Amino acid sequence: MEITEVRIFLKDSPDKKLKAYATVTFDNAFVVRNIKVIEGTKGLFIAMPSRKIKQPCVKCNFKNEARSKYCNQCGSQLPFVAAPVGQEVNSAANEQKDIAHPITQSFRDYLQKRVLEAYEQEKVRPSGV
């Protein structure tokens, strides 16, 4: 699979960890949007697009965000959901699920390299071009 285009959308606030969003086209046929470029403690990395995990209310079946204590529809108290063994209960990773992601480490490395290269080029590019 070949990456045929990478578009970078820089974020304005330089003091935040989120530096940009990327849209990546594969084989001129498939697009993945909202790949995040993030400044971590060990440098830049990419985070794949994700969505918040929902849990249904046992009373009204309304889907509430994970770790909610009360239902946003009916106000009932939601059951406590324990994290799987070896995972922290309050971890932010337990609240998000990737929509799309690389299967192999080698493809993840390839994708990250191409997105970060495009990000560096976009940073030095004159505004309005």
Image: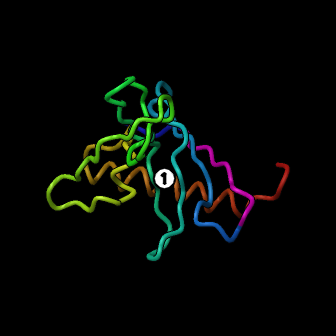
x and y percentages locating residue 93 in the rendered image:
36, 55
Is 62 rendered above or below residue 44?
above
Answer whether residue 55 is magenta in the image: no
Position of the N terminus by quadrant: top left
Q: Amino acid at mark 1?
A: Arg
Which residue is under mark 1?
114
Left or right, residue 17 beside residue 10: left
Q: Quadrant of residue 27?
A: top left
Q: Residue at x 45, y 53 (%)?
A: 47
Q: Residue at x 81, y 58 (%)?
A: 126
x and y percentages locating residue 41 in the rendered image:
46, 76
**Front one among 62 and 16:** 62
Is 33 rendered above or below residue 47?
above
x and y percentages locating residue 46 in the rendered image:
46, 56
Answer whether residue 12 is magenta in the image: yes
x and y percentages locating residue 32 in the rendered image:
49, 35
Magenta residues, start to end: 5-13
